[in-house]
Image (cartoon, grey):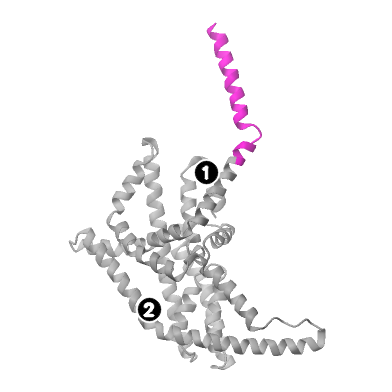
Amino acid sequence: MPGDEIKVFEAQLGETTLLRSGDGRPHWALSAIGIATILGLCYWGELVLSTMMVSVLLAFILAPVVDLLMRLRLPRGVAAFIAVVLLLALVGAGVVYFSSQALSFAQDVARYAGKIRAELRTFWEKAESFGGLTPAPFSNESNSEASGNLTTLVFRGFGSVTQGLVVGSFIPFLVYFMLTWQHHVRSATVMLFGLENRHTAYVTLGLISAMIRSFMVGNLLIGLFLGTVSTVAFGILQFPFFYFVGFVSGFLSLIPYLGVLLALLPPLIVGFGHVPSEAIIGSLLTVAGMHVIALNVLYPKFLGPRLQLNPLAVTIALLVWGWLWGGMGLVLAIPITAAMKIIFDHIHALRPYGAWLGE
């Protein structure tokens, strides 16, 4: 009987639905396995993936330059080549200009570190006589081990020197091809989806492109502003290497949450023993004040409308990507997380995750 067959089919369908839904355990187990697999791939493929991400960010920085050159009737390939050459020339000029200052700065850092260790050792020895404290491990061996651990943590994502040179040689070519083939890559990526999802994919890619461009340009402008103000302030306070330390401090201030602490280190290091205490206090107030202005005025103005990430999500992203890729992960954590939020917002099943990441 047709009616009985329909009832049997509905009963079987209901049983299948119950088996699929159950109490949610198979669904969450598969999700956990998928997340663990993705994290494993990101961890083991950090060199390749971080290189591609850096190339993408540089391509977005150079895209306006390519568009400007194309308005001058230059072919896209020629415009992209000129933009990459200008980038390499700018990086090379910066390396040549700051190399001697950076070497002197590094030597001073080593000398100041020895003075600071001596002062801490004296302070700890005096404290031992009052509280019976155990001797502090200020030996050269322990300091070298701590310094090595810190260097490994921060620079793990950059690889060794040889790996850095090999990766650096790939970046200009990747940037060039991303600039010349950007329309083809975008259209080909959209064609990977079904016909009913292509419009959503096209809009999502456009929003991610706009977010990354705003993130890079905004951070560059904010970093230049902070670096210029810090350089002028350190020069007035007569800090040594103020033209180098000012920009280092300004761009370190861009790192979320930890930026203000990292930005305080360069003026403290070069000012110790060279400038009076009033100048050091003035530099600390300058760095803290500029960080507050950047956090409450500049970031919301240039980056807030595009990122739309809540502070908890940003903190977790920094923790996770810093663990995965080291120092490079800290640099790329925010744009990666913001891109994930845009994707989540345009996939119906993932919208709750996008809402959790949002403000």
Residue 344 drawn at (x, y percent): 49, 47
**Quadrant of the image occupied by residue 16:** top right
Nearer to me, 359 or 351? 351
Tell me the SS state at disc 1. Answer: helix
**Image mark for residue 95:** 2
Residue 208 sits above or below residue 22 on the image: below
Residue 98 drawn at (x, y percent): 40, 82
**Quadrant of the image occupied by residue 67:** bottom left
User: What amino acid is labelled 2 in the image?
Assistant: Val
Residue drawn at the location 47% of the way across and 78% of the way down: 248
User: What amino acid is labelled 1 in the image?
Assistant: Leu
Residue 4 sits above or below residue 304 on the image: above
Q: Is residue 202 magenta?
A: no
> Viewed as shown, does residue 135 lie left or right of 297?
right
> Viewed as shown, does residue 38 lie left or right of 223?
right
Q: Quadrant of the N terminus?
A: top right
Report which residue position mark 1 lands on. Answer: 350
Instruction: Give neighbour class at mark 2: few <14, some 14-19, many 20+ (Cα, 10 Å).
Output: few
Q: Is residue 3 magenta?
A: yes
Nearer to me, 316 or 235? 316
Residue range (magenta)? 1-29
Rounded to the nearest angstrom, the CA distance separating label 2 from label 1 is 44 Å
Q: Main secondary structure of the magenta part?
A: helix
Nearer to me, 28 or 219? 28
Is residue 232 something one can see in this rendering? no
Tell me the SS state at disc 2. Answer: helix
Q: Quadrant of the C terminus?
A: bottom right
Residue drawn at the location 44% of the way across and 65% of the way down: 302
> Viewed as shown, does residue 51 lie left or right of 111?
left
Residue 211 drawn at (x, y percent): 42, 57
